[in-house]
Amino acid sequence: MELAALTAEIVDCFRCPRLVAWRELVARERVARHRDEVYWGRPVPGFGDPDARVLIVGLAPAAHGGNRTGRVFTGDRSGDFLWPALYATGMADRPVSRRADDGLTLHGAYIAAAVRCAPPLNRPTVEERDTCAPYLVRELALLDRVRVIVPLGQIGWDAALRTVASLGHVARPRPRFGHGAEARVGPYAFVGSYHPSQQNTFTGRLTPPMLQAVLARARELADG
């Protein structure tokens, strides 16, 4: 119930004027390939198993992905890369998800973002990031079975460290991000991954086996 109440609060957020204006502009104007669709055009809440032991932290919804469908990593190329990896490691019940109402279910995993609205050029400001940060803190506090955090990219890594610090777990020295990097911060194990953005997947910086290996390691730590 508390997680559902937080979700309702997130989707009704209007705290960042620039992000509100952008998400709504994108939803009105749309792109040609989605011109007949009704866009979500609101903040995108977390999604997954309330009893998750693995929390995956991304950056922000894509303008024509989560901002269109209303679910994180749904309807964009990053999601097309992430879902098969989650399926291969037993944390999703299907390898494809392009609509929020497709019945996708996560097992032992929950996905959230550092920023809940699609930002222009995928770059939220520091002020926008900090305004949104309490949502992730509250989400993690409610997901009290989480033992492993998988930040996607440097921004996800930094957001996750700030989140656990807000819950009283400060890492000293501060662990450095890297693909496959591991750290222990309070009760949480961190396992880093490059973000499944097109910039990384199209260039081969991140491959399916690389992402699957990180998620398999996260599950191993969570189940250990």
Image: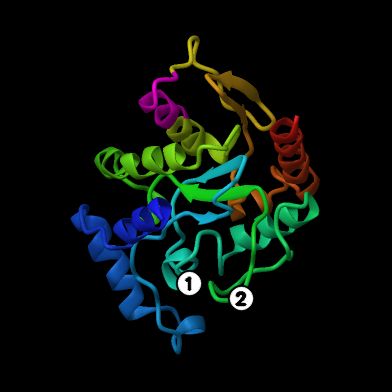
Point out residue 150 in the picture as x, y percentages from the top left corner: 60, 38
Point out residue 6 in the picture as x, y percentages from the top left corner: 35, 53
Residue 69 numbered tag: 1
Q: Residue furthest top?
A: 173
Image quadrant where residue 25 sits: bottom left
Residue occupied by mark 2? 102
Instruction: From the image, give the main secondary structure of the stretch colored magenta.
Output: helix
Point out residue 37 in the picture as x, y percentages from the top left corner: 45, 85
Q: Secondary structure at mark 2?
A: loop
The image quadrant where one finds the N terminus is bottom left
Point out residue 171 in the picture as x, y percentages from the top left corner: 48, 16
Q: Residue at x 59, y 45 (%)?
A: 195
Q: Residue at x 35, y 45 (%)?
A: 135
The image quadrant where one finds the C terminus is top right
- Magenta stretch? 161-169
In the visual, does 212 lie left or right of 61? right
Residue type indicated by callout 2? Asp
Label 1 or label 2, whichever comes before in sequence order: 1
Q: Secondary structure at mark 1?
A: helix
